[in-house]
Image (cartoon, rainbow, N blue to C red):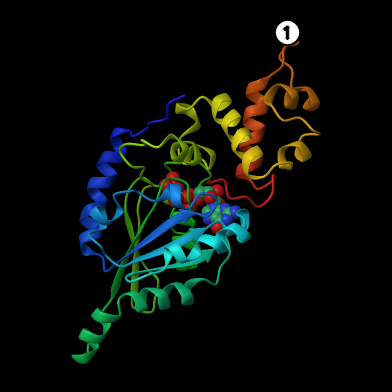
Amino acid sequence: MKINWFPGHMKKALAGMREELNKSDVVIYVLDARAPKSCINPELNKFTNFKPTLFILNKVDLSDLNRLEKIKNDFLGEGFDYLFLNSTQSGNGKIVCSKIKKLCKKKLIKFQANGINPTLRAIVIGVPNCGKSTFVNNLCKKAKAVTGNRPGVTKGKQWFKIGDGVEICDTPGTLYPNLENQEIAKSLAFIGSIKDEVLDEVEVAKELLKRLEKLYPGVVAERYKQALNLEDIAKVRGFLLSGGELDVLRSARTVLADFRNGRLGNLMIED
Ligand SMILES: Nc1nc2c(ncn2[C@@H]2O[C@H](COP(=O)(O)OP(=O)(O)OP(=O)(O)O)[C@@H](O)[C@H]2O)c(=O)[nH]1
Ligand SMILES: [Mg+2]
């Protein structure tokens, strides 16, 4: 299985994003905390032109805090900062605005010296399905951007006032043009950033089982009554086709859904 999915609409979305990016003071880069590094475009700096960046390690409620703690400092430095968030919960506005202001301190000081309180603009970017629109909605308090548990929900860019002198822009999810590193491509498939329709779900689920066994031995066996592969999962769950054959596609979909919905526990599936 070779994953390389970069549909034409994403090329258009990336070009459109560049315009909004130029208008922005800061980038809010939403990452799925179950595979945060895989979510980062390797050409990020070229793309953002070194704009201050706030990394949102989103979906922490589904991830492994022990492992996140070990890598969190990689998201901290000159011109960048991070936050761990569960965007489905409200009450993140204050901390997000204060981090944005900290990252834009130079601009704020310059304007405030002239008696002006400038509006700070933040563009929200990230791979499909990482929770950008949910994050934006949470900050707007009212649901404004459309969300859904599949990639490609947001089609166009939208600016929202989130109060306190900050405006943010939701954008459609984008992948990078060339997913050369297949381990990264697989991680993106596991977290649902690449449409299942263009993937071989059985192959993706087999790879996920392998990755889970390596990083969290015992988790799969515990969930599926000691079964470790799709055939055995079909047996223990009684997934049979009308001719009596094992329905491995149903096992694959079950494994993917269980992982994505947190039923296998709090996991970070990046190496
Ligand atoms: N558990 C959990 N689920 C989340 C969180 N943030 C978002 N989600 C869920 O993730 C799914 C995708 O959320 P969206 O906000 O539509 O993601 P998006 O990044 O805007 O997706 P695209 O517009 O397709 O790029 C939805 O089912 C959300 O409810 C979070 O912090 N925790
Ligand atoms: Mg969206």
Quarter of image, res 23: bottom left
In the figure, 185 relative to 125: above or below? above
Image coordinates for residue 190, horizontal then vertical, percent: 54, 39
List the residue tagged with mark 1: 243
The answer to which of 152 and 178 lies nearer the viewer is 178
Image coordinates for residue 262, horizontal then vertical, percent: 65, 48
Image coordinates for residue 87, horizontal then vertical, percent: 53, 61
In the figure, 126 relative to 166: above or below? above
Does the closest atom of ligand 1 sit within 8 Å of the Cβ of label 1? no
Left or right side of 154 for 35: right
The residue at the far top in this view is: 243
Local crowd at mark 1 within 10 Å, few (<14), some, or many (≥20)? Answer: few
Quarter of image, res 184: top left
The answer to which of 226 and 22 lies nearer the viewer is 226
Q: Residue at x 63, y 34 (%)?
A: 209
Q: Residue at x 66, y 38 (%)?
A: 213
Q: Is residue 147 visible?
A: no
Q: Residue at x 58, y 59 (%)?
A: 60
In the figure, 137 relative to 216: above or below? below
The answer to which of 47 and 8 lies nearer the viewer is 47
Name the kind of residue labelled 1 in the image.
Answer: Gly
Left or right side of 120 for 189: right
Q: Is residue 30 visible?
A: yes
The residue at the far left in this view is: 114
Left or right side of 150 for 103: left
Q: Secondary structure at mark 1?
A: loop
Report the number of discs.
1
Quarter of image, res 100: bottom left
In the figure, 148 relative to 57: above or below? above
Image coordinates for residue 176, horizontal then vertical, percent: 33, 42
